[in-house]
């Protein structure tokens, strides 16, 4: 029973601190990626969360597809990522399930 209690305690801590956890994660992501070609258009090298929320639009895959394709075609990964991209699994966006 102590394992279940421990798991429930961890779950409660994660859910009660969800906003802080999300803010911390966004901050880490922005610090790593603020100087990518994609984000520099909006953030000018800043990793400020409020600037990100204000300036970076919600996008679809089609919006970022040209950047992904450039990296897949051999350009440096800093076009879209602050960390090296070593593998690409490209998909047409369809699945083998029933339609």
Image (cartoon, rainbow, N blue to C red):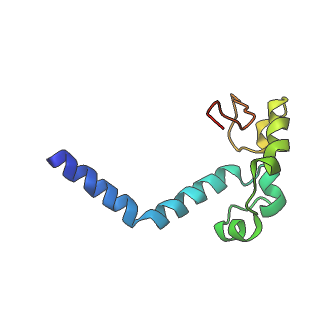
Q: Is residue 90 left or right of residue 29?
A: right
| Vertical side of 96 occupied by 1: above or below | below
Residue at point 23%, 51% (across, down): 6
**Which residue occupies the foreground of this view, 30 or 72?**
72
Q: Can you name the residue that lies furthest to the front here?
A: 99
User: What residue do we see at 72% from left, 55% from top?
Assistant: 34
Residue 97 horizontal/vertical position (percent)? 61, 33
Nearest the camera: 3 or 86? 3
Is residue 47 rendered to the left or right of residue 79?
left
In the rendered image, the quadrant that contains the C terminus is top right
Q: Residue at x 70, y 65 (%)?
A: 52
Q: Residue furthest left?
A: 1
Provide residue 23's location: percent of width, then percent of height.
54, 63
Residue that appears at 67% across and 66% down: 48
Disc count in the image? 0
Q: Vertical placement of 79 versus 18: above or below?
A: above
- The image quarter in which residue 31 lies: bottom right
Q: Nearer the viewer, residue 60 or 47?
A: 60
Residue 84 image offset from top left, x and y in percent: 69, 35
């Amino acid at each position: 029973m102590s394992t279940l209690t421990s798991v429930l305690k961890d779950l409660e801590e994660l859910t009660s601190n969800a906003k802080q956890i999300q803010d911390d994660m966004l901050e880490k992501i922005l610090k790593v990626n603020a100087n990518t070609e994609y984000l520099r258009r909006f953030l000018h090298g800043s990793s400020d969360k409020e600037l990100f929320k204000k300036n970076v639009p919600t996008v679809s895959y089609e919006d970022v597809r040209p950047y992904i394709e450039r990296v897949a075609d051999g350009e440096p990964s800093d076009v879209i990522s602050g960390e090296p991209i070593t593998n690409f699994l490209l998909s047409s966006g369809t699945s083998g399930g029933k339609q």
